[in-house]
Image (cartoon, grey):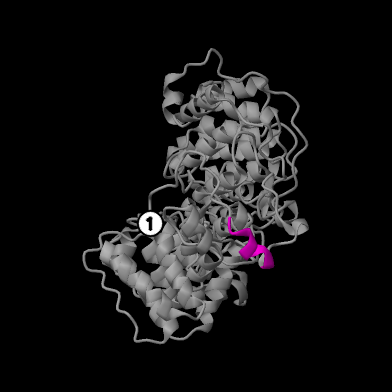
């Protein structure tokens, strides 16, 4: 079933409207501060979230990142639904064809099911394909929220039904492209590989090229190269074909293609040089030097082939690269260990690396020789935070990891260090501590989803402090309402007024306030949770239809800002409320608590 051109235009126009969330908040003026239906019975809470696993390694080969000619890192694939590529030579391929029973349908595409932590096949419900694709394409990643990013990844890698109006391979391409922009290279690779090679479209070939490079694996291009050269206009696939000739044991056959590319001057010289470097390494010839002269930016092609071949990337190019590259850097086994550790903080903040994966990475650094002094000191402190005798000694190690020089130092720790120290924090016994320490311990545990362990601190933290507020929001058993006096008792550290507003928005979204108290608090704090605009109407409709994936995507649309300081409290209310309505109450609680921790 397909949508009409007029229906598709309406879907695209609505999707474009949803992207102006921040402006809409300023323009719309509600008649009521409370939204319609406030105070209705809450749905049954979802199970408590478990510690977030690190990205799973996909089963097969992977693909590079970015369109080629001239191989820019930031160009997106073509927006329109692409035609099917020419069919392969069936007679030549018959010997290698998959049995019909083993072929994957385009009606259900994706690498992971609910058993692997992804969402259900009907996660996007009745939402139209062009509408969803437009939202994905226009989403500005990375998101400010670690937990919203984790949820969006679970939606994008899910084995879901292809929505009406789009080709299943093209829909997979849009999902993989967004995952790449989020830094989720392994997830993007798994999505493109969930489509049989015979079903690839030009758009999916283009994204697959990006996905393999983002995992530093030029060999992952080889199962796709022949079909891509026939069905895609990407110059990068021509170079990929040459590299694959060498990887198949025929390096001499690759050199005429490389010479032809140099004559045509596709891209900059570095692009062909890096492909030649792959061929040279495989062919046993003297290594080709990568000359970065005149290169003003690091594209995915350049990053992927440089890391795969061990070519040193100039520091200035790496420093100016798109932030997503840091996440790719942290995940790639081709990147030296110490360089991966240096990039790990950015990946952890965005939900690409789990707390357990961070600890494993630092454990590998501790076992290596000649670690840089900064990393060596951090690994020693992490070990001490786990195994030192006495809770006080372990707490001192935690403070050093959080960047605090003394008990009096109340500086807010970098969020990545909270992720790193989550399980070391849970080894601290519940006791009376300075507010700054209690706040960091609770925030660290919640950064890894350890809400039941964190709940043990409810009686050991100061009422009205940040740790108290986070525990109120994250409480997995919190069913009763919170009175206005309790809400008003929260003082909040740092930007107290902003944290108070986030605390209120979170409680309201979780259904923990009565109508009267919500109305009173909304007026006192000037948080217009009843404001209606195209985005609020869209996320409310998706929630009413029970579409977990659509709600996750629209929640991300509501966070189009570089950090938590730009997320409006009223947006947080709608996000938390919608997640709770579709049975994602655990994720709603984690996002609400994160808002207080990072506001």
Placement of 429 over or under 599, stated as above or below: below
Q: Is residue 320 visible?
A: yes
Q: Is residue 149 magenta?
A: no
Asked whether, in this view, residue 357 is left or right of residue 210, the answer is right
Q: What secondary structure is the magenta-colored segment mainly?
A: helix
Location of residue 510 in the rendering, given as x and y in whole percent from the top left corner: 66, 34
- Give the camera-side residue of 210 and 78: 78
- Give the camera-side residue of 17 and 134: 134
Q: Is residue 488 visible?
A: no
Placement of 362 over or under 580, stated as above or below: below
Query: Which corner quadrant holds the N terminus?
Result: top right
Location of residue 270 in the rendering, given as x and y in whole percent from the top left corner: 29, 68
Placement of 316 over or under 117, stated as above or below: below
* Residue at x 52%, y 68% (from the top left corner): 222
Location of residue 223 in the rendering, given as x and y in whole percent from the top left corner: 56, 66
Asked whether, in this view, residue 97 is left or right of residue 537, the answer is right
Which region shows up in magenta? 88-95
- Total numbered labels: 1
Residue pointed to by mark 1: 68
């Amino acid at each position: 079933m397909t949508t009409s051109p007029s229906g598709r235009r309406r879907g695209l126009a609505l999707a474009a409207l949803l992207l102006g969330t921040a402006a809409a908040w300023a323009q719309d003026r509600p008649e009521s501060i409370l939204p319609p239906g406030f105070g209705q019975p809450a749905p049954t809470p979802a199970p408590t979230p478990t510690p977030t696993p690190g990205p799973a390694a996909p089963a097969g080969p992977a693909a590079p990142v970015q369109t080629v000619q001239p191989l820019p890192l930031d160009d997106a694939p073509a927006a329109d639904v692409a035609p099917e590529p020419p069919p392969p030579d069936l007679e030549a391929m018959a010997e290698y064809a998959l049995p019909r029973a083993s072929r994957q349908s385009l009606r259900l595409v994706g690498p992971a099911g609910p058993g692997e932590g992804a969402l259900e096949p009907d996660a996007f419900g009745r939402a139209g394909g062009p509408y969803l694709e437009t939202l994905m394409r226009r989403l500005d990643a990375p998101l400010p929220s670690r937990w919203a990013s984790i949820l969006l990844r679970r939606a994008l890698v899910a084995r879901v039904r292809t929505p009406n109006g789009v080709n299943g391979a093209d829909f997979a391409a849009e999902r993989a492209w967004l995952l790449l922009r989020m830094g989720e290279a392994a997830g993007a690779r798994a999505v493109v590989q969930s489509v049989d090679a015979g079903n690839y479209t030009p758009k999916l070939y283009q994204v697959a090229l990006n996905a393999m490079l983002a995992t530093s694996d030029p060999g992952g291009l080889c199962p796709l190269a022949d079909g891509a050269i026939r069905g895609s206009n990407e110059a990068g696939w021509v170079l990929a074909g040459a590299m694959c000739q060498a990887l198949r044991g025929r390096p001499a056959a690759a050199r005429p293609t490389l010479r032809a590319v140099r004559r045509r001057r596709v891209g900059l010289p570095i692009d062909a040089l890096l492909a030649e470097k792959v061929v040279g390494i495989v062919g046993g010839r003297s290594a080709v030097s990568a000359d970065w002269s005149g290169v003003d930016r690091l594209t995915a092609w350049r990053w992927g082939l440089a890391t795969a071949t061990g070519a040193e990337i100039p520091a200035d190019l790496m420093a100016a690269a798109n932030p997503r590259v840091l996440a790719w850097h942290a995940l790639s086994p081709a990147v030296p260990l110490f360089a991966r550790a240096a990039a790990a903080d950015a990946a952890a903040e965005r939900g690409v690396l789990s707390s357990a994966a961070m600890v494993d990475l630092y454990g590998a650094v501790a076992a290596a020789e000649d670690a840089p002094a900064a990393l060596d000191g951090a690994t020693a402190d992490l070990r001490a935070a786990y195994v030192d005798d006495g809770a006080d000694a372990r707490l001192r190690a935690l403070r050093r990891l959080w960047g605090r020089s003394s008990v009096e130092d109340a500086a807010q720790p970098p969020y990545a260090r909270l992720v790193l120290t989550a399980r070391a924090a849970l080894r601290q016994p519940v006791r009376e501590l300075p507010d700054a320490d209690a706040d960091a311990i609770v925030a660290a545990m919640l950064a890894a989803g350890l809400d039941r362990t964190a709940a043990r601190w409810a009686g050991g933290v100061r009422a009205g402090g940040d740790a108290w507020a986070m525990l109120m929001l994250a409480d997995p058993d919190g069913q009763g309402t919170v009175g206005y006096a309790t809400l008003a008792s929260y003082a909040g550290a740092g930007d107290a007024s902003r944290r108070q507003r986030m605390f209120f928005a979170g409680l309201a979204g979780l259904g923990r306030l009565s109508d009267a108290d919500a109305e009173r608090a909304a007026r006192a704090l000037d948080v217009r949770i009843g404001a209606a605009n195209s985005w609020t109407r869209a996320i409310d409709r998706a929630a009413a239809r029970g579409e977990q994936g659509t709600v996750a995507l629209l929640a991300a649309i509501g966070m189009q800002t570089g950090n938590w300081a730009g997320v409006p409290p009223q947006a947080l209310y709608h996000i938390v409320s919608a997640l709770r309505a579709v049975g994602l109450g655990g994720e709603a609680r984690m996002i609400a608590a994160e808002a207080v921790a990072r506001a």
